[in-house]
Amino acid sequence: MLKRVNAAMGARWIAVCFAALLAAACAQTKPDGLTGNVKPGTGQDFVVNVGDRVFFEEDKSTLNAQGQTTLANQAKWLSRYSQYTITVEGHADERGTRQYNIALGARRAQAARDYLVSQGVSASRIKTISYGKERPVAVCNDNSCWSQNRRAVTVLNNATN
Amino acid sequence: MRGILKAFIGLRGLAASTRLVLFSIAMVFAQSSAQALVEIDITQGNIEPLPIALPSFSSEGGGSKLAADMTSVIAADLKRSGLFNPLDPASFIQKNMSVNSTPRFGDWRQISAQALVTGTVIKQPDGRLRAEFRLWDVFAAEQMLGQQFYTTPENWRRLAHIIADAIYERLTGEKGYFDTRIVFVDETGPKDKRVKRLAIMDQDGANVRYLTRGDDLVLTPRFSPSRQEITYMSYGGADPSVYLLNIETGQREIVGNFPGMTFAPRFSPDGQSVVMSLQQGGNANIFKMDLRSRRTTRLTNTAAIDTSPSYSPDGRQIVFESDRGGTQQLYVMNANGGSAQRISFGPGRYSTPVWSPRGDLIAFTKQHQGRFMIGVMRPDGKGERILTEGYHNEGPAWSPNGRVLVFFRDTPGATGGPQVWTVDLTGYNEQRVDTPAFASDPSWSPLIN
């Protein structure tokens, strides 16, 4: 039991680091020259061609139109590649208190999860977790960074690149 | 109580051989009969610190550095409280003080000392230390307090804190808080890949010890009021959960078997239960677990974020934060749950409430117009006072005497990070607690005994 959890965590961390690299290098745009080499159905395909994350307004957990589109595309991709289970990670920016942000991140993860389910992804494939304000991807001191941190990220649990 | 009073101050967490023994020194000098002249009313707003002289303790048996270090620790404790002004030893007229002779009070009046502490540290043939001190009222020319201790040399810092507590208590009428510890989260590494470890230190920042290795994300440690135990949140398991950690044995256990993430734990005042939040979908509700029966009880049931519960010291009520009204506000409910009364009504968001061990106040974090403040209000919500305000102040915790708050202050940007600060109830005395790295989520121990 413990072993399996650790293995899943390992895969997830690879995905998180990869996503963090992308976000740091080029925010939301697709890196040139990468798309062509991406193998369909891989974790990289999911992150680069579908988009693994949606963003939220300050202290809100409502999905905007762009977020709904991203999640709908995620749902389509997940129905094609049904071998994956996913963890939706909810996050908050640093401009809130720790305990509340844990719950706020959970609420955001839940909003993304509910939307994925509404788009046909089986609830049994989805786990949620909240990191509150503990795992920012952008560390500057203005809203351009804080808005990147207010996110729900869909992570493939058993991805290969 | 004339003659010799004997008391044993057990040292939990240390071997029995390091026990510390306290005797009151028989009052060999004129008994204090009249009301002492030196007193501090710490309920006032801005207090002029009391001038106090602490000549370096004398020593016998080759402990002069130890004696000087102990005196420094005592002086530093008193100074940091904001209530005392330890005078510059260069100004002292009477030199080479002996603990066994009456001071030349005129010499001390001349430099405006109102209180004087004399002491000595003697290395015994068996290796133990014997320390004595006397606290003098300079203007009344009387001894106010005299105590004698036996302990092992490695205990010298604790002994200094115990003496500082005795001085504080005698002069203010309030219990001291220097012989205490603070558990906190040590933070290292870049902001987007922070490594967090549980750590514990003396209240003055000395003797830092790490309780976890940094493999798992850990948050919000809180001291047990009755055991050498903390409760905290860890991401080490399948779901992030509330754990207990015995700080003597290192033994760790999960609190309860909840279906989902648990967080924001805090002990009840009797130490027999832990109250915390359980995440249920998009909502967080408050639950209690009895640590003996393992029985869990739901205390709130709302479509909202209910979190940061904290008991009143009599155990009858719980203050918590909830966004049930739209934004984070403070509510008080019966300890068994049921309906809750909102108590915060000012502009902004209120969170992380903590009930004072004295019962008279609730401390909180407040956010308003991009500023983060630490404040206090009475349990009925009246009398709100902001004690400190800035870019980011968060998470107050009370000193065991209910006079000082410890919290963390964060700084912005990629290189920013949290540091531990204290502020007293006047709001005038802010002090940083020196830590080896960034540090957050401080929580004060009860008085060690």
Image (cartoon, coloured by chain):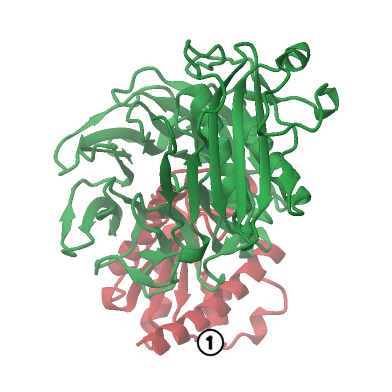
Chain colours: A red, B green
Q: Can residue B392 be seen in this view?
A: no
Q: Nearer the viewer, residue B23 or A73?
A: B23
B216 w.r.t. A90: above or below: below
**In percent of the image, x 61 and y 23: which residue is there?**
B136
Q: In this view, does A90 lie to the left or right of B311?
A: right
* Image spot of residue B434 (x, y percent): 68, 47
Residue type pointed to by label 1: Pro
Q: Mark 1 points at which residue?
A: A40
Tell which residue pokes out farthest to the right in this image.
B90
Q: Nearer the viewer, residue A135 or B343?
A: B343
- Per the image, label 1 sits on a secondary structure element best described as loop
Is the N terminus of chain B in the top left, top right, bottom left or bottom right quadrant?
top left
Q: In this view, does B309 lie to the left or right of B85?
A: left
* Image spot of residue B297 (x, y percent): 16, 55
Q: Which of B81 and B286 is in front in this view?
A: B81
B240 w.r.t. A5: above or below: above
* Image spot of residue B421 (x, y percent): 60, 39
Q: Mark 1 lies on which chain?
A: A
* Image spot of residue B43 (x, y percent): 47, 17
**In percent of the image, x 52 and y 61: which residue is there?**
B18
Query: On the image, which quarter does residue B321 sit in?
Result: top left
**In percent of the image, x 42 and y 52: which residue is there?**
B222
**In percent of the image, x 47 and y 28: which residue is there?**
B375
B53 w.r.t. B319: above or below: above
